[in-house]
């Protein structure tokens, strides 16, 4: 890629606030310049002022690091608002139930809008400013009915923020062996239409979805994520160190350590250079 302009992309670590091990891994990668965005769960169990200050200190040393809100509306987390419904044992619904209710139009958009506003307000209070961008845990921002409430709340409380859509770059074939990515493509088409109508910016393309349970080779996956990614495209990642709290909250554990090891390792900068992209 000698002589060619490098394409800037976003490499975003999700789930800051999920556990001490996840937080530490994300901060280390930001300080090393290996990622340039992270989104924080304000309903997570480890998102106090000390953790936020440590994140801000790491981000201050980076040339280009965006801090966003990871809107969370699925179990095993609990809402900030008193009257949020539906709930399951005081927690948000599990992912599959939340998606199903959205698909059949059984969610209350006003209740969801109020909860997202509360999470945006909590982020602003913790960080001292609105988020640079807003995305969703488990891609909940793309769900029918949720997306309308999500975009309205983002426009109201963080008008300068961009939002995350989950559609892949144009021209990439729709692989039948990547059902999760195909499903996100389908959900994101409507999300982008609604974002444009509200004059809300979003990432040009998205990559990073894969079957976490299969524990595949992350180096090979990262190379495929970079293929064809346009400027200001976004790759989602989930680095972390496994700890007891993470094990109690999320089945995605050891693969987080594999992601961290690759992103912090010596081969990753060469892969970025070979694909003509930069995080700076």
Image (cartoon, helix red, strand yellow):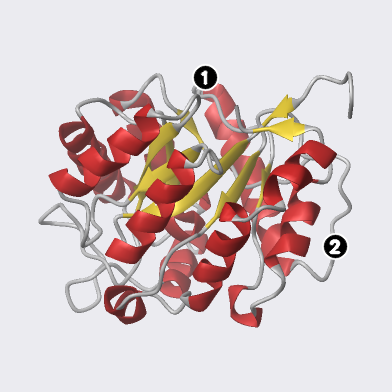
Decide which of tag 1 and tag 2 comes sooner along the chain: 2
Residue 230 lies, in percent from the top left, at 76, 32
**Rendered-image quadrant of the N terminus:** top right
Q: CA distance from mark 1 to mark 2?
A: 31 Å
Looking at the picture, does residue 187 appear above or below residue 76? above
Q: Is residue 141 visible?
A: no
- Residue 146 in the figure: left or right of residue 57: right
Numbered disc 2: secondary structure: loop
**Residue at the farthest left position:** 82
Q: Are marks 1 and 2 in contact (CB under 8 Å)?
A: no
* Residue at figure coordinates x 45%, y 29% from the top left: 62
The image quadrant of residue 135 is: top left
Q: Is residue 175 above or below residue 191?
A: below
Name the residue at 26% across, 66% down. 77
Badge 2 local density, few (<14 within 10 Å), some, or many (20+)?
few
The residue identified by callout 2 is: 175
Residue most toward the front? 266
Kindly report which numbered mark, 1 or 2, lies closer to the viewer in this rendering.
2
User: Measured from the top left, where is residue 196 in percent x and y?
Assistant: 58, 25
Q: In the image, residue 144 lies at what x, y percent?
A: 50, 52
Count of numbered circles in the view = 2
SS label for mark 1: loop
Query: What x and y, as percent, mark residue 231?
Result: 72, 28
Task: For the C terminus, give its image quadrant.
Answer: top right
Q: Which mark is residue 199?
A: 1
How packed is label 1: few (under 14 Cα within 10 Å), some, or many (20 or more)? few
- Residue drawn at x 52%, y 62% as measured from the top left: 103
Residue 264 circle label: none
């Amino acid at each position: 890629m000698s002589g060619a302009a490098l394409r800037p992309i976003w490499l975003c670590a999700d789930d800051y606030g999920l556990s001490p091990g996840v937080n530490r891994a994300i901060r280390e990668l930001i300080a090393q310049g290996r990622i340039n965005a992270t989104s924080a769960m304000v309903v997570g169990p480890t998102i106090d002022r000390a953790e936020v200050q440590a994140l801000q200190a790491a981000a201050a040393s980076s040339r280009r690091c965006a801090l966003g809100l990871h809107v969370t509306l699925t179990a095993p987390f609990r809402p900030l608002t008193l009257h949020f419904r539906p709930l399951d044992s005081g927690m948000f619904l599990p992912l599959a139930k939340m998606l199903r209710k959205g698909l059949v139009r059984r969610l209350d958009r006003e209740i969801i809008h109020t909860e997202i506003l509360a999470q945006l307000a909590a982020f602003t209070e913790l960080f001292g400013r609105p988020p640079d961008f807003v995305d969703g845990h488990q891609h909940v921002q793309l769900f029918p009915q949720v997306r309308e409430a999500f975009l309205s709340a983002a426009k109201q409380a963080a008008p300068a923020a961009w939002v995350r859509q989950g559609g892949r770059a144009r021209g990439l074939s729709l692989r039948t062996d990547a059902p999760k990515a195909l499903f996100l493509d389908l959900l994101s088409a409507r999300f982008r239409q609604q974002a444009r109508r509200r004059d809300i910016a979003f990432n040009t393309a998205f990559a990073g979805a894969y079957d976490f349970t299969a524990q595949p080779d992350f180096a090979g996956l990262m190379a495929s994520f970079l293929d064809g990614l346009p400027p200001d495209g976004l790759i989602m990642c989930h680095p972390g160190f496994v700890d007891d709290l993470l094990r109690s909250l999320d089945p995605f554990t050891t693969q987080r350590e594999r992601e961290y090891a690759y992103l912090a390792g010596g081969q990753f900068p060469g892969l970025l250079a070979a694909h003509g992209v930069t995080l700076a």
